[in-house]
Image (cartoon, helix red, strand yellow):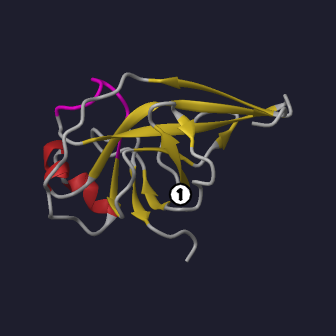
Amino acid sequence: MSAWCSTAATFAPAAHATPSTADAGIHRVDQIGDLSYQAMFAVGVQVFEYAGVIEERYNDDSTIYYTVLRKLHTPAQGTPGSRRYGFIGAALPATFAMYPTLGHPSVLAHSSFIFGVNPSRMTILPGSGLSQCLTFTIGPVGKLTGGGALASNTCWS
């Protein structure tokens, strides 16, 4: 890390994960709102919860915030009351960070590429940007208070 950049992170407790065997799916982001929370897991919606924020300072005068999300595999997992997100499309990593925002952490899913996160150190993986994108975001949907989006394997194609 260079002298002009520092990183700090705060994270919520980890949830225990068990893999889902769901093969069914939905095809449009706006369909997420038509499903009950339990059904989302059965039809292949990838459900994530807020895991924390990675904060980076540049030149001592600006700060960017990466909102980190952690995958939930069953409706019973996760921290009660945590902000939840739903994604359809390409498989996402178990832990990832949304594109950073300037000045304050993002609370809603937003369109752009994602960053890989080292889950044991909770740091951004070098060179991990631009590998996957979130697009066609929607606002809060029922228990998915963070909203949802379509996940794709390529960006800007």
The image quadrant where one finds the C terminus is bottom right
Magenta span dominant secondary structure: loop
Q: Residue at x 58, y 26 (%)?
A: 9
Q: Secondary structure at mark 1?
A: loop
Q: Find residue 24 and report its horizontal and vertical position in percent.
A: 15, 64
**Label 1 crowding class (10 Å Cα cut-off): few <14, some 14-19, many 20+?**
some
Q: Quadrant of residue 138?
A: bottom left
Q: Find residue 105 and report its horizontal and vertical position in percent.
A: 59, 34
Q: Residue at x 26, y 61 (%)?
A: 31
| Residue 138 in sight here | yes
Q: Which amino acid, by three-letter code, is at mark 1? A: Ser
Say if 80 sits above or below 59 in the image.
Answer: above
Q: Is residue 57 left or right of residue 76?
A: right
- Provide the residue span drawn in magenta: 76-85
Q: Nearer the viewer, residue 123 or 13?
A: 123
Q: Nearer the viewer, residue 99 or 21?
A: 21
Q: Find residue 142 and report its horizontal and vertical position in percent.
A: 28, 41
| Residue 106 in sight here | no
Identify residue for label 1.
111
The image quadrant where one finds the N terminus is top right
Q: Find residue 153 and report its horizontal and vertical position in percent.
A: 45, 67
Q: Quadrant of residue 64?
A: top right
Residue 18 part of the magenta segment: no
Q: Residue at x 84, y 34 (%)?
A: 4
Q: Number of marks in the image?
A: 1
Residue 83 part of the magenta segment: yes
Q: Nearer the viewer, residue 126 or 62?
A: 126
Q: Nearer the viewer, residue 71 or 40?
A: 71
Q: Residue at x 44, y 36 (%)?
A: 119
